[in-house]
Amino acid sequence: MKTEKRDDRTLVRIENLSKSYTRGGQEIPVLNDISLVVKRGEFLALMGPSGSGKTTLLNLIAGIDTPDRGALTIDGLDIADMSESELSSWRAETVGFVFQFYNLIPVLTAFENVQLPLLLTSLTRRERREHALAALEAVGLSDRTDHYPSELSGGQQQRVAIARALVTDPLIVVADEPTGDLDKKSAQDVLNLLSKLNETFEKTIIMVTHDPRAAGIAKRILHLDKGVLADALNHDI
């Protein structure tokens, strides 16, 4: 595992990154020579047509997948050079995940779902409880701690998922189509929450979305087309 000299403002640095997959004996390129810098506290939206590589890029940044070529450093640490076991530990400490379909465990309450990532830490039972309750309060669900996912609306389930992503105080929150399974009002509520987390708590958020309205809350929008960064639209950063 390698480290580089840290730039206090740079959190993610990607240089000449490429990724391909093999299907049916054929190599299919997904990302081609991507270079990108994400600053601390930034809210970045990745857009592009289906198959453009945006989810693959998100998974690489989150340490779910590894690149074929190129450098990928997070907070000065070269995660492209990590073993699978090192990546697993790094993800647990560094990345909060928000998915389109929530990925909540149906037999656990909202509180238990949020507390789950903390079971792998050295926190005491009391500390885990305090952290989980604080995360649920941050997403406005203090009154739903004992409810099961089936007793919550889609928007509430996604807020539980966001609380679970926040409970370990990660450096980066990655969100893959976080509003894709929600009605218009619930989607707006989730977007407002993500914006608050970025503005008030200065969380660095990288979000994949196909919805221009969702992307509009980000401070920067990058477009991927056939595995290449096509252009960048910058809001105020």
Image (cartoon, helix red, strand yellow):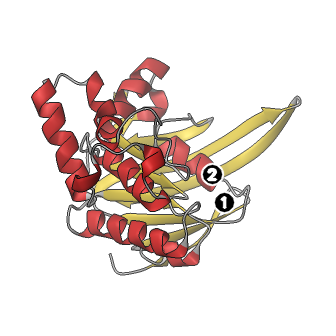
Q: Left of 49 or right of it: where is 101?
A: left
Amino acid at the residue labelled 1: Val
Vertical side of 123 occupied by 225: above or below: below
Q: Quadrant of residue 26?
A: top right
x and y percentages locating residue 43 in the rendered image? 38, 65
Quarter of the C terminus within the rendering: bottom left
Q: Are marks 2 and 1 in contact (CB under 8 Å)?
A: yes
Q: Earlier in the sequence, mark 2 or mark 1?
A: 2
x and y percentages locating residue 171 in the rendered image? 29, 47
For the residue labelled by badge 1, is the local secondary structure a helix, a strand or a loop?
Answer: strand
Label drawn at residue 164: none
63 and 160: which is toward the camera: 160
Determine if residue 98 is in view.
no
Q: Quadrant of residue 20?
A: top right
Q: Quadrant of residue 133?
A: top left
Residue shown at 75% from the left, 45% from the top: 29
Residue at the disc numbered 1:
228
Determine if residue 135 is in view.
yes
Vertical side of 205 occupied by 184: above or below: below
Residue shown at 57% from the left, 49% from the top: 57
Residue at the disc numbered 2:
33
Residue shown at 63% from the left, 35% from the top: 68
- Label 2, residues with CA under 10 Å away: few <14, some 14-19, many ≥20: some
Mark 2 → mark 1, Cα distance in angstroms: 7 Å
For the residue labelled by badge 2, is the local secondary structure a helix, a strand or a loop?
Answer: strand
Q: Left of 195 or right of it: where is 215?
A: right
Amino acid at the residue labelled 2: Asp
x and y percentages locating residue 76 in the rendered image? 31, 41
